[in-house]
Amino acid sequence: MNKSLYSKLVFIMLLIILSLMSVVGAFLMNEIRSFYLDDFYEKMKTVFENQGLANDLYSAADGPDAAKHMAEIVQLYSGQLGIDSRSRNYYILSGDTGAVLGGSGSEEGELAMTPNITTAIGGEEGYISVQSADYMDVALPISGSTGNYIVYIIDNKSSVRELSSAMFEIILEALLIGLAIAALLSLLLAKTMVTPIQSLTRAAERVAAGDFSQKPDFGSEDEIGILTRTFNSMAGQLEDTLNDLTKSEQMRREFVANVSHELRTPITSIRSYAETLMENSDLPPQTERDFLGVIVKESDRMTNIVSDLLTLSRFDAGSIEFQFERFSIKKAISDVYNSMLMEAQKHNHKFTLEFKTELPEIVGDNARIEQVLINMVSNAVKYTRDGGRISITAGANADAVWISVRDNGIGIPTEDVPKVFDRFYRVDKARSRESGGTGLGLSIAKEIVTRHNGTIALDSKIGKGTTITVTFPVEGPHEN
Ligand code: ADP
């Protein structure tokens, strides 16, 4: 990746330098050429518009040795005209044929016929500049009594060509140096950009391999910095999700193991009693009845476990419809009290009910709330030695109703209190099983209370007793 980014950056930089230099070079060369051209015609005009020079030339044309004199006169102005006998020369030509009569250049006889010479032969001043030609010239007709003459200045552009090629070399050198600097700079630039991207890539590879321990941080506020922070927050969320998934996967496994274990126990016991009955046809009738009783009790237990599990899985799937309606919670509590009274009395418990305040009617699922209360009371009965005290108290504040079930039973060790709402969690498995418990009652109770937007809390001291309190909002869960 870094290789391609490097080369891309270098390539782009080089391209920029190359195009920049080409444009500048072409522009400069063109400027030089047109400056030289303009300068030439400017000079010619300035010199030849000088009336003194014109007068001198005309009077020379009238005298003897006209061409020679005229040449001498032009020679006097050679400084101003830029005559250097190398690239720029002057000539005195015959005004009729264009033949060379004298001048600074080495050409004898005929010069190449240029448009300007032709114009001058025709008696007009030749100041035409031909951009594409490899020369610049000016031809001025001078007529005198001794004949027609032309003062002719020609520049073969060799100096401008030399200047151009010198310029071209300079531009080429500058281009090479520029390219080298650009290559170096773009490497540096690529490095500053690529280094954080590389470490971000490494971090992403680590995350992909499940290692969240290192978080890249460049402390910069630029795009790379933003990318890094976004990456880190994404990695953080991924880590949380993974942890949650692992946790729920662990819970699922535990749950499956628990279910299998819970179901195997009654099956094993049913099987062994049934086998004994099958193999021993001569058992006393009372023993046979006892054994059959155990089988029935164990199958009831299995039915209970399966139906509780079904309830819980329906809660999990959200497929249980609650019948929310306004009903008298006071009546529901009294009904639960009355239905559990016999059971409590069977164990010689002193069972009381007290309303601390008036209770308003609440919005909720009457039957399910009664199910919760029955579970609370039956736990109190189950986990209190015979002859204990069990009380239901209830009251209300502005927006909620609370119901507490208190017993002076065996209690729960402090460290187990937070776990009693977990599925299948039981402090004393044998005791719970003995009394027909499934270890799912409080889990179901908690689901029901939560659906009502209520709370459930358990307070217990080992050997002293337990108080479990639920609250339900008067107006029910607001989602409905
Ligand atoms: P179970 O069917 O075993 O009663 P629950 O979910 O109703 O299942 O209760 C979970 C566990 O919490 C029980 O096994 C018991 O150990 C403990 N527990 C619940 N209520 C009481 C209570 N009133 N006194 C003592 N322990 C209790």
Image: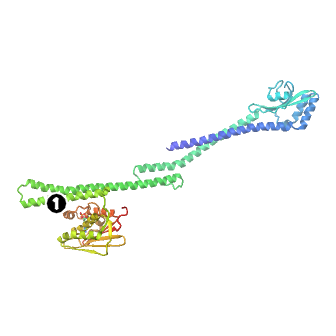
On the image, the x and y values in percent for residue 454 come to 34, 66
Amino acid beneath label 1 = Lys
Where on the image, by quarter, is ligand 1? bottom left
Look at the numbered disc 1 and give the secondary structure of its residue: helix
- The front one of 350 and 214 is 350
Residue placed at 29% from the left, 54% from the top?
A: 253
Side of 396 where 122 appears, left or right? right
Residue 460 visible (yes or no): no
Q: Is residue 196 left or right of residue 129?
A: left
Q: Return the residue found at the far right.
A: 63
Q: Nearer the viewer, residue 125 or 224?
A: 125
Indicate the position of residue 193 as horizontal and vertical percent values: 53, 48
Give left or right: position of 400 versus 335: right
For residue 350, what is the image quadrant? bottom left
| Quadrant housing the C terminus | bottom left
Which residue position holds label 1? 297
